[in-house]
Image: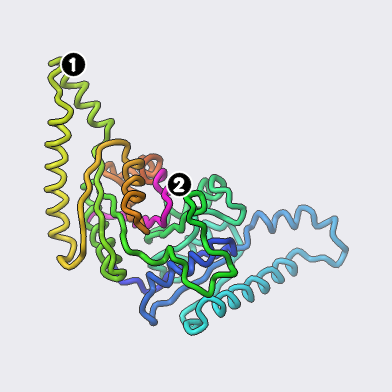
């Protein structure tokens, strides 16, 4: 895991703002690590002002109005820092940008040398489909650095703290158990290293899960039964495959995870994203770590299935490493 020197916290002043800041502070623990608070004035809103400007008084100026919005939001960010963590205000850099939100986030990652992005998976309107289908999904897909998505815990009876409670660190920021999903691709070692580092920092248990895809099992069964009807023994196949994967996972843990990290291995069979989320729920984990690429190395393929569905439905924060290179 590379040293995190600067964290980007994407702020939209929604109910998840406190959660975003709390998780940003977890991953920027040392005092010399900076946190950039970014808010984006959506170009869509600016265009809306321009389209109806003829209805405003003659002295109304769109550019001046946008600058007033920028000033107000700068003040809101400063007040937020003072309210949440006044003793650490020197660590925070605030920025207001104008444009398409995901584009400005990606530009900020580059210009500020960001090592980790923290953002909510819902926007101010709390319509998960709207944000996930546009800005959030595009950041997940294209970010060159890991992205931590604060989840919609309300639908799982884990309601996020409101702005009135931002003086306290949200309970969700306390990581005691985390799940790392691996598929034995070239990215698995780095996923384990990153997850292990988080476990060390948080004194948390690391739970490693791998899923035998039921579609692959069905394909093997159909192929065998085609030539030798009735000869496929499901229990034996799953027993052998589980044992093989447990051994393989244990070897990875021995090589890439320090011995002092409390860890365990879970091998399941089923639909990957469902089994991953079931593991998170059963373990009462506070974080899911995975990569947006899978064994195929096709980000579009995995993101359209396992990774995207995990991002959409996971009840706890999801850390996508967005790894691009082989280990």
Magenta extent: 308-327
Location of residue 269 in the rendering, given as x and y in whole percent from the top left corner: 25, 37
Q: Quadrant of residue 163?
A: bottom right
Task: Identify the residue at horizontal 24%, vertical 41% (top origin).
Answer: 268
Q: Secondary structure at mark 1?
A: helix
Q: Against 9, is 272 above or below? A: above
Residue 315 belongs to magenta span: yes
Sequence-earlier tag: 2 or 1? 1
- The residue indicated by pointer 1 is 226
Residue 321 in picture, x, y percent from top left:
34, 57
What residue do we see at 57% from left, 74% from top? 80
Which numbered disc covers residue 312? 2
Q: What number is the disc on residue 181?
A: none
| Residue sitting nearer the eye, 269 or 312 | 269
Is 186 within the magenta?
Answer: no
Q: Are marks 2 and 1 in contact (CB under 8 Å)?
A: no
Place residue 1 in its image quadrant: bottom left
Q: Position of residue 168 (x, y in %)?
A: 50, 73
In this rendered view, identify the residue nearer to me: 90 or 175.
175
Report whether 24 appears left or right of 207.
right
Between residues 218 and 233, which one lies in front from this camera angle?
Answer: 233
Q: Residue 279, position in %: x, y?
A: 31, 48
**Left/right of residue 128 with respect to residue 264 in the rendered view:** right
Q: Quadrant of residue 4?
A: bottom left
Between 182 and 204, the residue placed more toward the observer is 204
């Amino acid at each position: 895991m590379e040293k995190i020197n600067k964290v980007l916290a994407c702020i939209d002043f929604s109910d998840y703002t406190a959660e975003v800041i709390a998780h940003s502070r977890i991953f920027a623990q040392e005092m010399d690590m900076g946190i950039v608070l970014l808010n984006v004035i959506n170009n869509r809103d600016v265009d809306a002002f321009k389209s109806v400007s003829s209805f405003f008084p003659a002295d109304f100026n769109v550019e001046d109005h946008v600058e007033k919005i920028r000033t107000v939001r700068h003040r809101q960010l400063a007040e937020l820092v003072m309210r949440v963590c006044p003793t650490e205000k020197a660590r925070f850099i605030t920025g207001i940008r104008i444009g398409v939100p995901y584009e400005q986030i990606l530009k900020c990652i580059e210009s500020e040398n960001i090592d980790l992005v923290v953002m909510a998976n819902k926007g101010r309107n709390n319509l998960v489909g709207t944000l996930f289908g546009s800005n959030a999904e595009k950041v997940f897909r294209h970010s060159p650095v890991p992205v931590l998505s604060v989840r919609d815990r309300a639908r799982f009876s884990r309601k996020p703290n409101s702005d009135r409670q931002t003086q306290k660190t949200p309970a969700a920021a306390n990581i005691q158990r985390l799940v790392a999903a691996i598929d034995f691709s070239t990215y698995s070692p780095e996923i384990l290293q990153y997850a292990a580092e988080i476990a060390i920092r948080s004194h948390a248990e690391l739970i490693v899960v791998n899923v035998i895809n039921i579609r692959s099992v069905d394909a093997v069964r159909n192929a065998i039964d085609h030539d030798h009807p009735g000869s496929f023994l499901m229990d034996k196949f799953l027993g052998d495959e589980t044992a093989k994967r447990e051994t393989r996972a244990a070897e990875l843990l021995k090589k890439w995870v320090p011995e002092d990290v409390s860890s365990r291995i879970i091998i399941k069979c089923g639909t990957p994203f469902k089994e991953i989320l079931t593991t998170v729920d059963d373990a009462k984990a506070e974080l899911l770590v995975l990569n947006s690429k899978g064994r195929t190395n096709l980000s579009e393929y995995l993101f359209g299935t396992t990774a995207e569905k995990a991002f959409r439905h996971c009840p706890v924060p999801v850390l996508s490493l967005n790894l691009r290179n082989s280990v």
